[in-house]
Amino acid sequence: MQFIDEGYIIKTQKHGERSLILTVVTREHGRITGYARGAVSKKSLGVYQIGNQIRVEAYARVEENMLSLRCELMVPVAVNFLNNPQKLACLSSLCALSNECLPMMQPLERLYYYLESFFNLILENNWITHYSYFEYYLLEFLGIGLDLSECSATGVCENLEYVSPKTAKAVSEAAGEPYKDRLFKFPHYILRNDYYPQGSEVKNLLEMTGFFLNKNFFQTHNLKFPQSRANLLGNL
């Protein structure tokens, strides 16, 4: 097996004195893990950093073997996270979620677009909005997306203002008013494709996506919710 792809480094693990085990989220092959021989050197120091975009040549003699990777730096994205605790917190969360949730060697479809947008637009003022889109569409990719088409209680499609933590479905303003303290806010900006929402809207969405990722994916699969994601809102 052999292929060439590009993607972002989300995890590194030292292997021996001079090599690394890399996990990369790639455009065409999804999450891949492989062995990068000689990656620990002065010459390669700036290449194998979390968040960097790389071109990767992957090969294995048989499919059951771990991939061997030859990597070339495309864009040194990692430097854009330095000295910014909030951006580093989101980077850590995205990498942990990607490493735990994304399947090996399977295309990510449009989810890759949202992941790539986060890295490409990290220097924009609305960078955290792009992170929130990634989490929202991660739910969809995992098959546990929100149903925001109509009110789960009444069936109406207008004045949707809440989301039920029990059903992950929309609730209208009238139906949800008596229970609003127990409901999530409806993510209007996502449905409007608005990339300049209020900060409170982004926070509300991340509270909701974190809840459903934990409940409907991690707990369902008996996995521990990543600490970096659990701590995210407190670090923003």
Image: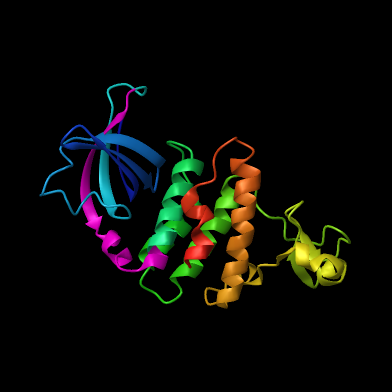
At 29% from the left and 59% from the top, the residue drawn is: 78
In the displayed structure image, the side of residue 14 where residue 118 appears, left or right: right
- Quarter of the image for residue 15 reads top left
Would you place residue 99 above or below residue 84 in this image?
A: above
The one of 89 and 133 positioned closer to us in this rendering? 89
In the image, 40 versus 75, the foreground residue is 40
Where is residue 199? Give x, y as percent. Answer: 55, 75
Indicate the colouring scheme. rainbow
Q: Position of residue 224 (x, y in %)?
A: 54, 41
Residue 143 appearing in the image:
no
Judge whether 157 appears above or below 46 on screen: below
Q: Quadrant of the N terminus?
A: top left
81 falls in the magenta region: yes
Up-down relation of residue 138 to residue 195 (above or below): above
Q: Is residue 74 visible?
A: yes
Farthest residue in the right direction? 154
Most foreground residue, 230 or 19: 230
Query: Residue 111 vs residue 49: left or right?
Result: right
Q: Residue furthest left?
A: 43
Residue drawn at x 26%, y 44% is: 56
Residue 80 lies, in percent from the top left, at: 30, 66
Stretch of the chain drawn in magenta:
65-87
16 on left or right of 198: left
**Residue 213 picture location, percent across and down:** 60, 49
**Could you tell whether 228 is left or right of 74 in the image?**
right
Residue, x 50% and y 60% (percent of image)?
232
